Image (cartoon, helix red, strand yellow):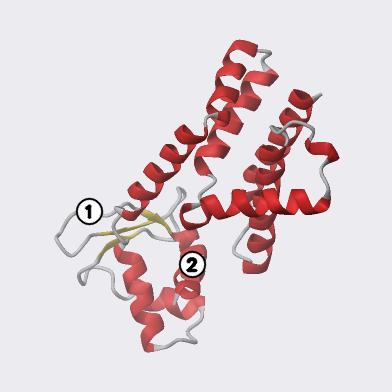
Amino acid sequence: MTNFIFLKRLERLNRLTKRWAYSGTNTVSREKLAQQIIDQYLATRRSEQQNHLTWSDERTSEYNGKEFESIYCWVTVDPVTQLAKKGIEHLEKNELDKLRKILDELSNEQKLISKIKSRIRKSRNVREHPLNKLIASELQKNPTINLPNLTKRLKALEGKGVITQWDSEEANNENYIYSKYSDGKEAPRVKVSGLKERYYDVRNKK
């Protein structure tokens, strides 16, 4: 019974994380989904404990508090969700031996902590995209600037330093914005259609 409950909760956690990619830029909706992912993660962790279904509300709350506190300073669900996705794939293919390895990884607390800390260290070393800096600069000049006007301002900067190329809107393929860092190194290209999400991400950080 315990393994069945664990797998069902793991499956729901996987579904929730898949929804994240399509959750849009609505801050309220994303915060609500993030809370659901955290709640489901805690429920999945509880299902590994013996007789967890008979726990009192007080004991469940205490467990959640300790579990959340232990990951509070460096929480990221990426390593967990990646394992969950692999687990679901193996389950659907009835690859029980491979699924057992995934469950072993999920139950290895120290290994998960190591994965999470490694992910955070890597994320801290990622350079701020030059396009983000331009957006932040425009927001600093005009905090109420809307997306259409911001897009016009950025497009006017093409060929003047940071933005080296802005694909024509008439092109049949996906349009991209090409830019470079202050040291001249080429930055990852950015989809023109992704400007909206980037704009809200930068604005919400300010």
User: Which image quarter is the N terminus in?
Assistant: top right
The residue type indicated by label 2 comes to Asp
The residue type indicated by label 1 comes to Glu
Q: Is residue 170 left or right of residue 5?
A: left
Which one is in front in this view, the residue at disc 2 or the one at disc 1?
Answer: 2
- Residue 161: percent from the left, percent from the top? 20, 69
- Disc 2 is placed on an element classified as helix
- Residue 27: percent from the left, percent from the top? 62, 68
The residue furthest left is 183
Q: Is residue 175 left or right of residue 44?
A: left
- Residue 146: percent from the left, percent from the top? 51, 81
Of 152 and 104, nearer the camera is 104
Residue at (69, 32) in percent of width and height: 48
Name the residue tied to disc 2: 201
- 135 relative to 99, above or below: below
Name the residue tied to disc 1: 186
Residue at (62, 19) in percent of width and height: 90
User: Which image quarter is the C terminus in?
Assistant: bottom left
Q: Is residue 178 left or right of residue 205?
A: left
- Disc 1 is placed on an element classified as loop
Q: Which mark is first along the chain, 1 or 2?
A: 1
